[in-house]
Image (cartoon, coloured by chain):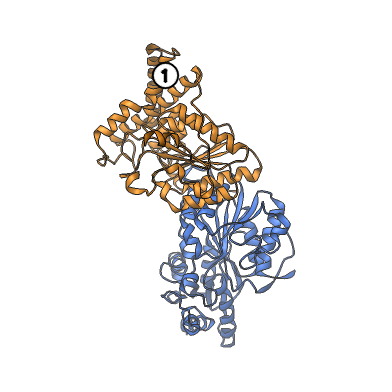
Amino acid sequence: MVELTVREALRDAMAEEMRADGDVFLMGEEVAEYQGAYKVSQGLLEEFGARRVIDTPITEAGFAGIGVGAAMAGLKPIIEFMTFNFAMQAIDQIVNSAAKTNYMSGGLINVPIVFRGPNGAASRVAAQHSQCYASWYAHIPGLKVVAPFSAGDAKGLLKSAIRDPNPVIFLENEILYGQSFEIPDSVDHTVPIGSANVVRPGRDVTIATFSIMVGKALAAAETLAREGIDAEIIDLRAIRPLDENCIISSVEKTNRLITVEEGWTMAGIGAEISSIVMQHAFDYLDAPVTRIGGSDVPLPYAENLESQALPQADDIAQAARDLCS
Amino acid sequence: MAGAKKKAKSAKTGKAHGGTPSPSREHLESYYREMLTIRRFEEKAGQMYGMGLIGGFCHLYIGQEAVVSGIQNSLEPGDTVITGYRCHAHMLSAGVDPKYVMAELTGRAAGVSQGKGGSMHMFTPEHGFYGGHGIVGAQVPLGAGLGFAHKYRGNDRVAVTYFGDGAANQGQVFEAFNMAALWKLPVIFVIENNQYAMGTSVARSTAIQELYQRGESFGIPGNQADGMDILAVQAAAQAAVAKCRVGDGPVLLEMKTYRYRGHSMSDPAKYRTREEVSKMRQERDPIENVRDLLIALSFSDDEALKEVDRDVKAKINDAAEFAQNSPQSGITELHTDIFMTA
C-alpha cells in the first residue's frame, strides 16, 4: 500500500493507461503547460508530450465534440472539463453524440471516451460554479457515471473508465483532490464500474451516498456510534450502473435507509434509490426512506449560507437519530 | 457585380479552384448512374413516406446530388466523412446497397442501423462514413475530431465534414474552425448551401452571405463552387483534398446548391415560389447537366441512357420491395447496443 492524494491517484491512473495504450490522450483547458487547473495532470506533458497532452482554447462544445469524433474513429480520449459546470456548454455533444451513437448505429460505432473533472460545490464559488451533475448524467442511457470518494477508487475507477469502450462521466470533487488515502501500489489495480462498496458495516441504518458525502457520512457514523447507533455506509462509487443489489441487501439487514447527495433532491439520486428500495425491499423497511440533499436553492456565496445549504455530518446524524428512534 | 463576384470565388487566403478538367467518359457515366440512383432513391423514399411506410423526419437530397457525388469520388479509402441529418445520399455514395438504407427508413432489422437510427442516423464506418447526425451543427466538431484522429495517427487521410447554410450559424462550428486551424487538422469543411435553413433563406439568417469566407478570420482558405455542376464540385474537392493530404488543411468549400423538395417531408416549402424551384430544375439540374454532357461529347446516347434509367429504377424498386417486406427487429433488440460490451 502507498499513501496518495486523490489528485495524485488520478494523475497516476492517466499516466499508467497512457503508457499502456498509445490511443489514450488527454485534452482540455490548461491540462498541459499549466499542469491542470487543479494540478491533476501534473507531469503528464513532460512525460507524454504535446501530441498526447493537449491544451485547448476555452471552447467546451468544440473540444468535447472533437473528442467524441476522435473516439468514433477509435482513439480513447480523456476530456477534462475544468469543472463540470462548464460542461453544460458541451452537454449536447455528451448526450446526443457520445451517449446515443452506439445505439443509433446498431452497434457499428462505439464511443470510448472519458469526460472528467471536478463536480459539485467547491468552496464559496457560488451558484454557477457549484452544481452536482450526478443525476443529470445518470438520467441518460448510454452513459456510465462514476463518482469516487477515496484515492484508491479514484485511480481504480479512472483506469476502468479509460479502458471502457463506452462514454464514461467521471465526477471528481475539488475538495477531495488534496485528501490522502492508502491505496494499492499496483498498475493492475482497477475497480469495476458498477460495484458499490460498504465502507463501514453496521446494523441499524444504511446510509447510501457517494463522492465527498461519503466522508461526511463516515463522520456522522462516528458520532452515532457513540450514541449506540450502528450505521452502515455504502459508497456507491458509480451512479450508473447503480449497484442495486448492494443497497437492497444492506436494507434487508438494517431495515432503514438514508440517501445523501450534495445535489438537489428533486429528481435526484436519492429519489431513484428510494424507488428501487420500495420496489425490491418494501417489506424490509421499518421506516420511510429519508433523502438528504442540498437545499433547494442556487448555492449562495456567504460562508454561513453555503454551509447551511450543503448537507453536513450533523444533518446526516440527526436524520439517523430520527429514523432509529 | 456578377462578373466581379464570379472572379472572387475564393477567399483571400485561398486560391481559386482551377478550370473544369475535361471529363472522362467513365467518370461521367458513373456520376450519371450514381446521381440518378440517389434521385430515384429519394423519390421512392418520398412516395413511401406518403404511404406511411416511412415515419418520423425524412429529409430528401433531391437537387443536391452533385455535391456528395463529386466530393465522394475525390476521396480514397481511409478518408472519413460525416454530415447532418440529410444523409441518405452520403450512405449511397459511400457504397452502401440502397436496400439496406431503405430498410433503415422503413425501420426494419436489415436496416443499416437495425432500425434504431432511422433517416437521420445512418453510419457505415467500413466505408469511412460516420453519420448521419440529427443536431444541426453538432457534426462539425465531430468531423474535426475525425480529422484529429488522422493527424494523431500520422496518416495522410482527410476528414470531410458536411453541414448546411443553417448549421453554418451555430457557435460550435466556429469553435471547430478555430481548433482545426490551430492544429492544422486535415479537415475539409463543406457547406452545402441549399439556400434555405428549413424555411429561412440565407439572406434572412446570415449577415455576410458569402459563406466560403466564413473561415477567413481563422486563416482557413475558402472556395465557392457551383454545386449543381459535378465537374466544378469535383475540381474544388480534388484541390481541397490535395491540400489536406500534404498537411495544409483545413479548408472550407461552399457548394452553392438547391433542394427541390421541402426541408423535410412535412415541409410544403411555402417560403419560396414555384417558379424559383422550377427554374432551378429546368436550367440547373445536376443530373440533366451530366446527361447533356454525355450526349454532347458523344459518350452516350438516348438509348443507352434510358437503359441506365431502367436499370437504376429497377434497383430502387427492388430496394423498396426489400425494405417493405423484410422483417421488423425483434423486440429484444430494444435493449441491445446501449453499451458496447468489452
Q: What percent of the width, then of the height, locates residue A268?
A: 44, 68
Whether residue A7 is situated above or below residue A193 in the rendered picture: below
Q: Going 68% across and 66% down the picture, which residue do you hit?
A: A9
Q: Colour of chain B?
A: orange
Q: Colour of chain A?
A: blue
Q: Residues within 10 Å of mark 1 (few under 14, many from 20)?
A: some
Q: Does residue B336 appear in the picture of this structure?
A: no
Pick whichever, A164 or A124, lies toward us.
A124
Q: Residue furthest bottom?
A: A227
| Chain containing the residue with disc 1 | B
Which residue position is annotated with label 1? B293
Q: What percent of the width, then of the height, locates residue B250?
A: 55, 43
- Left-right relation of B212 to A179: left
Q: Quadrant of the image for the N terminus of chain B?
A: top left
Q: How many marks?
A: 1
Q: Does residue B59 appear in the picture of this structure?
A: yes
Tell me the quarter of the picture where residue B224 sits: top left
Pick whichever, A225 or A158, lies toward us.
A158
Q: SS of the residue at dot 1?
A: helix
Q: What percent of the width, then of the height, locates residue A40?
A: 65, 65
Pick whichever, B4 or A68, lies toward us.
B4
Q: Mark 1 belongs to which amino acid? A: Leu
Q: What percent of the width, then of the height, locates residue A293?
A: 46, 74
